[in-house]
């Protein structure tokens, strides 16, 4: 089992990624520049991430530093909003139920996600479109990592194992199934921030899959 420091670094990375894939504001842009992106760089260093992934975070930091809130909001709209063409939807079921054969699984997937959340005290409004949003799934992985880190610090091996097992299942059944598709959609995306953020997302999720292996 990993130590609390590494698990805390995972939690930090998931928190920052969730912020990156939430609708931007002036306050969130300031927080990303002053705290969050440097914290992501530190977390990846702790986890021994590849140099290319750490360099991507530096590129992201430079891109965010060059933008004002209106410019970042315009990039968000161009990539993710219907008014901008909905270039890349940010819901799991939009990416994992693309064929007619898979479409009937949408309700099951949403119910399964909600079941994971409920088991750890997170409630979402049915039909709100929040449960399978990328930011929400990243926040949930952040929560599991925080709970695991606290359990490790307190010597609660069984509790830490429960959180780790849930993270493995959620990664395999949900988050890990579609972040690569987000990156593929955004490779030719608009602006300088979200294509880079999507590459970092896929790189970190791939790293965490290896980290979560027994």
Image (cartoon, grey):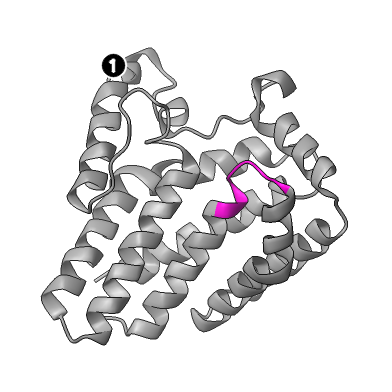
Residue 180 falls left or right of residue 31: left
> What is the x, y in percent for residue 138?
44, 52
Indicate the quadrant where residue 30 lies: bottom right
Local secondary structure at mark 1: loop
At x 23% / y 31%, what residue is drawn? 111
Magenta portion: prevailing SS class: loop
| Residue reaching furthest to the top | 100
- Image: magenta residue range: 19-25
Q: Is residue 6 above or below residue 127?
A: below
> What is the x, y in percent for residue 203?
55, 60
| Residue reaching furthest to the left | 158
Q: Is residue 196 above or below residue 211?
A: above
Residue under label 1, please give it: 104
Query: Image quadrant for the N terminus?
Result: bottom left
Q: Nearer the viewer, residue 133 or 57?
A: 133
Residue 53 falls left or right of residue 49: right
Q: Nearer the viewer, residue 2 or 139?
A: 139
At x 64% / y 31%, what residue is drawn? 80
> What is the x, y in percent for residue 86?
65, 24
Question: Disc count in the image?
Answer: 1
Residue 161 falls left or right of residue 68: left
At x 15% / y 81%, what residue is drawn? 156
Q: Residues within 10 Å of mark 1 (few under 14, many from 20)?
A: few
| Residue reaching furthest to the right | 66
Q: Is residue 5 above or below residue 200?
A: below
Query: Image quadrant for the C terminus?
Result: bottom left
| Residue reaching furthest to the front | 27
> What is the x, y in percent for residue 97?
39, 24
Q: Nearer the viewer, residue 21 or 30?
A: 30
**Is 108 inside the magenta-drawn segment?**
no
Residue 181 falls left or right of residue 198: left
At x 26% / y 46%, what residue is drawn? 117
């Amino acid at each position: 089992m990993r130590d609390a420091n590494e698990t805390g670094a995972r939690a930090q990375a998931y928190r920052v990624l969730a912020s990156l894939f939430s609708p931007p504001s002036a306050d969130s842009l300031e927080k990303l520049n002053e705290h969050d992106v440097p914290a992501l760089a530190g977390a990846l260093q702790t986890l021994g991430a590849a140099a290319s992934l750490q360099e991507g975070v530096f590129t992201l930091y430079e891109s965010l530093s060059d933008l004002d809130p209106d410019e970042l909001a315009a990039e968000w709209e161009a990539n993710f909003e219907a008014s901008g063409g909905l270039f890349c939807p940010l819901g799991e079921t939009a990416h994992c139920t693309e064929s007619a054969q898979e479409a009937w699984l949408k309700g099951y997937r949403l119910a399964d996600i909600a079941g994971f959340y409920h088991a750890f005290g997170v409630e979402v409004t049915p039909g709100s479109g929040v449960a399978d949003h990328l930011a929400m799934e990243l926040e949930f992985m952040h929560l599991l990592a925080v709970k695991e880190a606290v359990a490790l610090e307190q010597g609660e091996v069984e509790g830490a194992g429960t959180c780790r097992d849930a993270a493995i299942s959620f990664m395999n059944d949900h988050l890990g199934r579609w972040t690569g598709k987000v990156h593929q959609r955004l490779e030719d995306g608009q602006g300088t921030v979200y294509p880079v953020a999507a590459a970092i997302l896929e790189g970190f999720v791939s790293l965490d899959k290896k980290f979560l292996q027994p």
